[in-house]
Amino acid sequence: MTMTMTTVDQSLQDAVMRQLSWTPDLDASMMNATAHDGVVTLNGFVNTYAAKLVAERVTRKVYGVQGIANELEVKLAHERIDPDLAHDALEALQNRIDVPPGIGVTVRNGQVMLTGKVEWMFQKAAAERAVKYLRGVRSVSNQIEITPRVSPKDVQKRITQALHRHADLEARRIHVDAEGARVILTGNVRSWLEREEAVHAAWAAPGVTAVESRIRITP
């Protein structure tokens, strides 16, 4: 049994490294991947926070990946002082029509923290997208709160309808429960990517402040 698992882990590890090397906007020479029971750990160095996110995204696409621990370290080619980065972050937020006014920015050692309140998850996500690709960013902590404005029953109904509209998901295998503005997903899907799609569909409902995925991956 140990021999079989070791072979499976090695095969998954090799597949992830091939995927990272195949991605043109990544330098995989400074990265390493290890796998254990479907969980892949990424470590090594990248020169931008954006590259760290890309590495995680392409790893999710590899068949057999059930979880990711992204321990890649961002080593910037050119350092920036925090006030300049904070200025650019505020300007980037102001230039997006999908980010409402009132989002606060704090920067320390290249680590950006976003605060404030919005009504929709897409607004919170848009704020993070606005700053995470800025030069000099090492990490982003999105502390923006979502203010609920709909009933739990309405949230549950909207998410269930969204899942059934999604062509890539077998919605009948996913169950939705809403506790206030918190959503719990249970059931089974065939891949990590399908589970992510279900979570994204849940986050798209208005007023949702938390999504807990208990969906199991059964390839």
Image: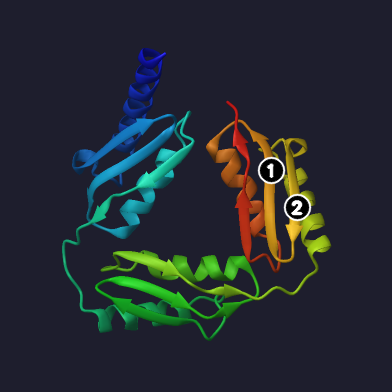
Residue 138, position in %: x, y? 29, 64
Helix, strand or loop under label 1: strand
Q: Nearer the N terminus, badge 2 or badge 1?
A: 2
Give 185 or 54, whichever is nearer the viewer. 185
Rendered view: 158 above or below 148: above
Helix, strand or loop under label 2: strand
Number of other residues with Cα within 10 Å of mark 2, as a class: few under 14, some 14 to 19, many 20 or more: some
Residue 37, position in %: x, y? 43, 29
Q: Which mark is residue 29?
A: none
The residue that appears at 22% across and 56% down in the rendered structure is 47
Rendered view: 159 above or below 6: below
Q: Is residue 14 left or right of residue 190?
A: left
The residue at which mark 2 appears reads as 177
Query: Circles 2 and 1: CB distance less than 8 Å?
Result: yes
The residue that appears at 30% across and 67% down in the rendered structure is 137
Q: Amino acid at mark 1?
A: Thr
Rendered view: 89 above or below 45: below
Q: How many marks?
A: 2
Residue 141, position in %: x, y? 41, 68
The residue at which mark 1 appears reads as 186
Q: Is residue 7 visible?
A: yes
Q: Quadrant of residue 204?
A: bottom right
Q: Quadrant of residue 188?
A: top right
The residue that appears at 59% across and 42% down in the rendered structure is 195
Q: Is residue 98 visible?
A: no
Give 1 or 81, whichever is nearer the viewer. 1
Q: Is residue 101 left or right of residue 14?
A: right
| Disc 2 to disc 1, C-alpha distance | 8 Å
